[in-house]
Structures are given as C-alpha cells and as structure tokens.
Amino acid sequence: MPLTDKEISEYLVYRIKLNELIHFHLLWVELNSGDFGSSVGGIDIRAMLDSVRTAAMAWIPTSVDRKSLEIFRLWKKMFSQYQKRIELYQTAVQPYLDLLWRFRNKTAFHADPTFAKFFEPRVRLSAQVKEVSEAMQRFLRLAGFLMARENRVDPDLHSRILGVVLSAELTLNCRISRQWLIDSHIVDRNAIYGKRYF
C-alpha cells in the first residue's frame, strides 16, 4: 500500500538515519580491521572503537522509536507482501530495543548526570553485547533487503521524496542538494535528471 505524503516524509528521515547507522557500522569495521595500528591521533584504537560502537548502538532505537520514527510500522504498510518477514525480524530485535532505548537516552545521546545511572545501561548492554550486535545485524539485513525493493512497491517513491524535499526547501527557504541525495543512495539519479537515451 502506498505511503501517505506524511509517511513519505518519515521514510526520508528514516533513510537518512539508516545511512548514518551504516556509516557508523562501516567505520567500526574499518577501525577494527587493524589497518590503523594501535591508535588514531594518539588515542587508543579500543577507545575509538568503543565510541563508534556507542554511537552505532544508539542509532537503531532512533529508527524504531515508538514515539517518533517507527520504521516497522512504515515497512509493514509499504512492503505488505513481506509482512511476515518484517514481523519475524521485529520479534528478533524487540527484546533488545528497550535496552537500546535506555542506553540511547541515559548514556549515548543524552547523559544522565548521576554517574551510576549514566553507566548502568552500558553495564547491561555489555552483558548482552553479542546478542545486541546480532540483532543489529538482523535489522541491517532486513533494511537492505527492503531498500532493494523500494521501487518495486512504489515506482514513484523517488519523485515523491523529491516533492517532500521541495516542500521543505520552500518552508525553510533553503536549498537541499540533490547531488547529496543521489550520493547517499536515497534518490535515484534518474528521478532528478531523467533517463539518458543515446
């Protein structure tokens, strides 16, 4: 079922946040590869890995937040033919979402000023880091699977996204780079420039 214009706007926000999550994940993989040696700019590589992992772990709950951007709801509507698959993945990551929301809100994005309350979610997350990492991988696999099928479920998706971008530009009196949207793999080049025929 096609998304409403409001939902297209939410989907665009989700795609931007997903790109950031993927970038954090790839940065963590690169840092963990050992190619950078034991430090970056004099800072121990393990401390860098921990900081990047903190940011990445906090990004997932932003994409599935019941109070704002709830991607599972949008996915179920947009990709109704994959509803069972989406529900299966949602069930697999759900046990870790409360832990990740608490980590995001008390430790990662916001900081509880009481050290014990600030550190408590990190302790709980560390105790289940393997399971949480696997849940994160499942979420990324599902996101990739569905992204590859966006145009099949809504052939006008990219033009509708561009409509949301234009509306934001008019509201904010600014210019949003179409090239950035193309480079970020959010909008297909053909949606902006059309197809080339030689």
Image (spheres, rainbow, N blue to C red):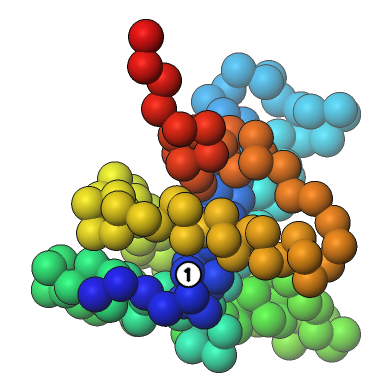
Q: Image check: 13 left or right of 83?
A: right
Q: Residue at the spot x=87%, y=29% of the render?
A: 42
Q: Image check: 181 left or right of 131?
A: right
Q: Residue at the spot x=83%, y=67% of the render?
A: 172
Residue 89 lies in quadrant: bottom left
| Residue 187 against residue 57 in the figure, above or below | above
| Residue 128 against residue 53 in the figure, above or below | below
Q: Residue at the spot x=77%, y=65% of the render?
A: 170
| Residue 183 against residue 9 in the figure, above or below | above
The answer to whether any part of residue 130 appears in the image is no
**Residue 134 placement (x, y as % from top left):** 34, 57
Number of other residues with Cα within 10 Å of mark 1, as a class: few under 14, some 14 to 19, many 20 or more = many
Q: Residue furthest front?
A: 198
**Residue 54 placement (x, y as % from top left):** 64, 59
Q: Secondary structure at mark 1?
A: helix
Q: Residue at the spot x=65%, y=35% of the render?
A: 179
The amino acid type found where label 1 is placed reads: Ile
**Considering the image in quadrants, where does the N terminus appear?**
bottom left
Q: How many numbered discs, if any?
A: 1
Q: Image check: 80 left or right of 18?
A: left
Residue 30 lies in quadrant: top right
**Residue 64 placement (x, y as % from top left):** 46, 76
**Residue 102 placement (x, y as % from top left):** 60, 83
The answer to whether any part of residue 58 appears in the image is yes
Q: To which residue does mark 1 refer?
A: 8
**Considering the image in quadrants, where does the C terminus appear?**
top left
Q: Image check: 172 left or right of 137?
A: right
Q: Residue furthest top?
A: 198
